[in-house]
Image (cartoon, rainbow, N blue to C red):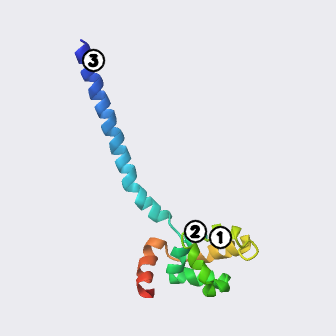
Amino acid sequence: MKRIKYTAAAAILGCLMFGAATVQAQAEAKAPAAAAAEAKWSSDSLVGDLLDYAPAKAVLIKHMPAIGQDDQIEQARGMSFRSLQQFAPDAITDAVLAAIDADLAKLPPPAAGNAADTAKTK
């Protein structure tokens, strides 16, 4: 009798583990597609990504012309543009970030446009 209980418990546990693994695999498969659908350029994007995509770089230069001549901006490639505000709050104001976000929102999503444009600019 005990053996039957253990076998049944093991079978149920196996089904639960398989079901959980299947659900997790399905969620992981959907994650990249969902992330790509939600991806968009913004001041929360990495500086390096914005600089590498010519239309995004043009938006930054439009609102902050000094960026085009600042060699130190290369040191911030791994930071989000928004995070730079703490280092230059007088230059990177909330209004400037809002204007940058508005213009960046008009650009194609990163997955759609960045790779093709990066190849052209390098």
Please name the residue that numbered disc 1 is placed on.
84
Residue, disc 3: 5
Asked if the residue under mark 3 is in contact with the one under mark 2, i.e. CB atoms within 8 Å, the reply is no
CA separation in Å, label 2 and label 3? 56 Å
Asked where in the image residue 3 lies, by quadrant, the reply is top left
For the residue marked with disc 3, what is the amino acid? Lys
Q: Badge 3: few (under 14), some or many (20 or more) residues near its Cα, within 10 Å?
A: few
User: Would residue 35 be found to the left or right of residue 79 on screen?
Assistant: left
Percent coordinates x, y for residue 102 in the rendering = 63, 74
The residue sitting at 30% across, 38% down in the picture is 18
Question: Which of the marked residues, 3 or 1, is nearer the chain's N terminus?
Answer: 3
**Residue 119 coordinates in the image, percent (x, y):** 40, 83
Mark pair 3, 1: CA separation: 62 Å
Circles 1, 2 touching at the beta carbon (< 8 Å): yes
Under circle 3, the secondary element is helix
Q: Is residue 105 visible?
A: no
Q: Which residue is mark 2?
A: 79
Kind of residue at badge 1: Leu
Q: In the drawing, does residue 91 fall left or right of residue 101?
A: right
Residue type at numbered disc 2: Met
